[in-house]
Image (cartoon, rainbow, N blue to C red):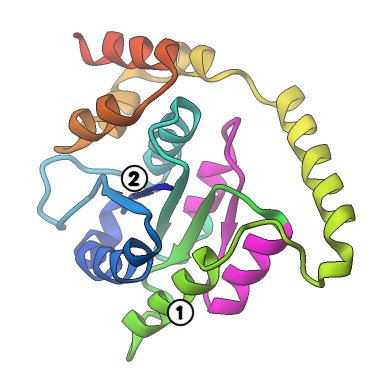
Amino acid sequence: MKIALINENSQAGKNCIVETALKKVVEPMGHEVFNYGMYTAEDAEVLTYVQNGILAAILLNSGAADFVVTGCGTGAGAMLALNSFPGVVCGHAQDPVDAFTFAQINAGNALAMPFAKGFGWAAELNLEYIFEKLFSQEMGLGYPKERAAIMAKNRNILNEVKAVTHTDMLTILKNLDQDLLKGAIGGAKFKEYFYANATNDEIKEAVKAVIGE
């Protein structure tokens, strides 16, 4: 699994803490982590939580990432921003139980976390435990397991609803404020990671046009 990490500006200083915990847990499982920043609070390229949503949607819909880990001060803004887009099902987790139940019941492809609220002593351990519960087993197995079938049915219904209520990504990329969009994909590692991993040629070409390549 290709896991993308995205931090917005207010919590950029914690990027290294989150990346270290994420890699420690998921790399032994065989997953890859691609850190799209922000890397520090002093980065020239600044991401807002709204741009987190844009970047996450591009990565997930293009195939450049299979899962996105993100957040903001409370995690709520990032979750709302990501869920504004097609092809993205973002949950919210502050503890390992949140992560486990989201993975097993909702089986989404993104998680927003609070990197300020409740982020105190032993925060790195909480991150590790969250990532363990999120990625340690196949998603969507159900909890409780006897309700797995109805949960899967409801996930499919939600996806069908989102297909009706959301515009496709190519139209979104065309109609978004282009400065906002360019800022979302202006990170230092974006081109390196995106072009190496994206599988949707139409979105790749649309991104190239935005960047000016």
Q: Measured along the vertical axis of the image, is residue 44 above or below residue 22?
A: above
* Label 2 neighbour load within 10 Å: few <14, some 14-19, many 20+: many
Amino acid at pointer 1: Tyr
Residue 92 on image: x %, y %:
57, 62
Q: Residue at x 41, y 39 (%)?
A: 65
30 vs 67, nearest the viewer: 30
Q: Measured along the vertical axis of the image, is residue 193 above or below residue 2?
A: above
65 vs 211, nearest the viewer: 65
* Label 1 neighbour load within 10 Å: few <14, some 14-19, many 20+: some
Q: Which span of residues is magenta-colored? A: 77-105
Q: Residue at x 33, y 89 (%)?
A: 122
Q: Is residue 179 left or right of residue 72?
A: left
75 vs 122, nearest the viewer: 122
Give the image quarter of residue 142.
bottom right
Q: Is residue 163 left or right of residue 87?
A: right
At mark 2, the secondary structure is loop
Q: Quadrant of the C terminus?
A: top left
User: Magenta stretch: residue 36 in it?
Assistant: no
Q: Pointer 1: what residue? A: 129
Q: Are marks 1 and 2 in contact (CB under 8 Å)?
A: no
Q: Residue at x 45, y 40 (%)?
A: 53
8 vs 144, nearest the viewer: 144
Q: Which mark is residue 48?
A: 2
Q: Which mark is residue 10?
A: none
